[in-house]
Image (cartoon, rainbow, N blue to C red):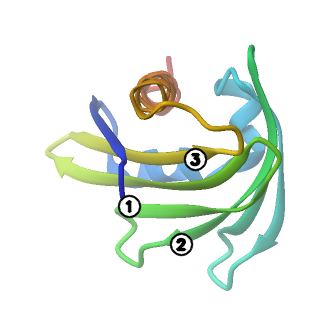
Amino acid sequence: MADESTQSIEVDALPQEIMAVIADFPAYPEWANAVKKTEVLEDGPDGRARQVRFTLDAGAFKDVYTLAYDWAGDGLSVSWTLVKGQMQRAQNGRYLLTPAGERTRVTYTLSVQLAVPMIGLFRRKAEKMIMDIALKELKRRAEGD
């Protein structure tokens, strides 16, 4: 992923517990504040979502978009790319889970290109804010808080 942002957080949960939260797209509106609706459009042979449509409302940024997911066989990473979006021209992302005893380091990498031009510095700031919020919400959900 060119011109991407990366952020990590430690979570008091095992990788398979965190990946179960990440893979449970119908539950996203319960814990991911900006996600108002999700719809799994296609499942893969392993039963995990292959394509998901999101309805996002993050205040000034609203979008309906579809992501295609690629689940690693080891259960420690998932990556995605934008299939279709209203406000986005491209999105590439990845969660990488690194076991650390009873804890797991979750590394989130994200690159977004909006349909309207945005100065790189502002885009990276927006990506970092999105990742920070997403990681904190994921941590709360995985730790059961």
Amino acid marked by disc 3: Gln
On the question of residue 66 being in view, the answer is yes
Percent position of residue 96, x then y: 33, 54
**Distance in Å between CA atoms under marks 2 and 3:** 20 Å
Percent position of residue 27, x then y: 73, 39
**Camera-nearest label, 2 or 1:** 1
Amino acid marked by disc 2: Asp
Which residue lies under the disc numbered 2?
A: 70
Horizontal side of 124 relative to 87 (left or right) equals left
Q: Secondary structure at mark 2?
A: strand
Crowding near pointer 1: few (<14 within 10 Å), some, many (20+)?
Answer: few
Which residue lies under the disc numbered 1?
A: 1
Q: Quadrant of the N terminus?
A: bottom left
Identify the residue at image location x=65%, y=25%.
31
Horizontal side of 59 relative to 133 (left or right) equals right
Percent position of residue 100, x then y: 14, 45
Q: Is residue 56 above or below residue 133?
A: below
**Distance in Å between CA atoms under marks 2 and 1:** 15 Å
Q: Secondary structure at mark 1?
A: loop
- Of marks 3 and 1, which one's residue comes earlier in the chain? 1
Which residue lies under the disc numbered 3?
A: 113
Identify the residue at image location x=46%, y=48%.
111
Identify the residue at image location x=69%, y=79%.
44
**Distance in Å between CA atoms under marks 3 and 1:** 12 Å
Q: Secondary structure at mark 3?
A: strand
